[in-house]
Image (spheres, helix red, strand yellow):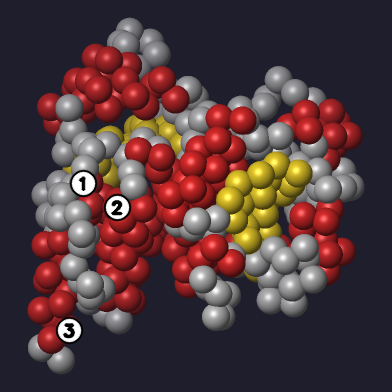
């Protein structure tokens, strides 16, 4: 199958709430769309696939990469994104999330939301009636996961098959950790959460990863043994205290994680892989979970990864806007004319 033909011409589900809702072939379709569209746009191509389409963006939390990437994606594809927040609309004041969702669905073509609780994104999807994309919840970060897999595919270890590739997520079991466990094993890789026992990834996610491994190859495990860093192709970390941990003092997290789980030059060396790559979803607390020497060093893909949020969002709005195959057909026609 060529780079312009999708196995799934339309999404199997209306909404993109969790990568776990889709099988391997559909995730690959989304990644294929993302990379093909990126190449076309970077070569000077112009797309108008979402002309006159509107994306409602609801942010219950601050955002840099998610907001910018969705706004730019919609503009590059001929559409428009509306930046909304509970303090700027009636949500949380005089209106329920269910009623807000119904209004979104009457006026907009798609919804994207970053929410405090996963139940909120489920309600938006249910009551809006239009495709809804999870821009992050306390459970998962699926748009980040797509961008991360694009970055991994862009930097695939030479000569390795998927079940030879090892992804080690270091530190706290954040929602990003959950998503990387799910999506990396779905794509046949080996996943390790390397972190303290009192912050280990939930058994639910390890079981999902193991079942993916049985179906697609690869594996999933938690470990606090530094030996499990050996052979890592990708080291990934996230902040130790983030948007969902405001009630926990910083010094508590530092005591749990520092210095053992700081990604530094010594940890890079401990992998035994001179080509190991470093990933971080950003923003980073520099010299806490990762040192400057790693984040800014030759192993780091963190800012390529950030750029690939835009790569991912273009594919997601096209795919769940049900115009991905049409867009790829158009790109192929343009390429054939050259």
Q: Earlier in the sequence, mark 1 or mark 3?
A: 1
Label for residue 335? 3
Whole-percent x and y of residue 263?
78, 56
Whole-Å distance between the Cαs marked 1 and 2? 8 Å
**What residue appears at the point 19 percent right and 54 percent down from the top-left corner?**
8
The picture quadrant where one finds residue 147 is bottom left
Residue bearing mark 1? 11
> Is label 3 in a helix, a strand or a loop?
helix
Which comes sooner in the sequence, label 2 or label 3? 2
Image quadrant for the N terminus?
Answer: bottom left
Foreground residue among 62 and 143: 143
In the rendered image, residue 328, in percent from the top left (x then y), is placed at: 18, 68
Instruction: State which quarter of the image contains the C terminus.
Output: bottom left
Q: Residue furthest front?
A: 214
Q: Which residue is mark 2?
A: 26
Front in this rendered view, residue 15 or 124 = 15
Q: CA distance from mark 2 to mark 3?
A: 24 Å
């Amino acid at each position: 199958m060529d780079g312009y033909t999708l196995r799934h011409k339309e999404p199997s589900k209306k909404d993109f709430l969790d990568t776990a809702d889709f099988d391997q072939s559909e995730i690959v379709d989304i990644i294929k769309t993302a990379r093909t569209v990126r190449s076309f746009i970077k070569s000077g191509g112009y797309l108008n696939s979402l002309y006159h389409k509107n994306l409602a963006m609801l942010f219950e939390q601050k955002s840099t990469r998610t907001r910018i990437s969705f706004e730019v994606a919609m503009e590059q594809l001929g559409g428009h994104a509306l930046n909304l927040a509970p303090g700027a609309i009636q949500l949380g004041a005089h209106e329920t999330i269910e009623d807000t969702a119904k209004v979104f669905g009457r006026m907009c073509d798609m919804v994207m939301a970053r929410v405090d609780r996963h139940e909120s994104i489920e309600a938006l999807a249910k009551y809006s009636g239009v495709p809804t994309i999870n821009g992050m919840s306390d459970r998962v970060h699926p748009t980040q996961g797509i961008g991360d897999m694009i970055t991994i595919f862009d930097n695939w270890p030479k000569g390795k098959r998927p079940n030879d590739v090892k992804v080690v997520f270091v530190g706290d079991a954040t929602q990003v950790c959950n998503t990387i466990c799910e999506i990396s094993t779905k794509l046949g890789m080996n996943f390790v959460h390397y972190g303290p026992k009192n912050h280990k990834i939930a058994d639910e996610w390890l079981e999902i990863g193991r079942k993916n491994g049985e179906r697609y190859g690869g594996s999933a495990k938690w470990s606090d043994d530094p030996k499990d860093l050996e052979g890592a192709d990708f080291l990934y970390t996230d902040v130790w205290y983030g948007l969902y941990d405001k009630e926990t003092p910083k010094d508590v997290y530092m005591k749990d994680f520092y210095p053992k789980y700081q990604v530094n030059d010594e940890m890079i060396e401990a992998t035994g892989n001179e080509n190991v790559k470093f990933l971080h979803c950003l923003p980073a607390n520099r010299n806490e979970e990762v040192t400057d020497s790693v984040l800014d060093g030759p192993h780091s893909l963190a800012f390529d990864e950030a750029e690939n949020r835009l790569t991912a969002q273009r594919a997601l709005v096209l795919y769940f806007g049900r115009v991905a195959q049409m867009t790829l057909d158009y790109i192929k026609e343009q390429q054939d004319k050259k």
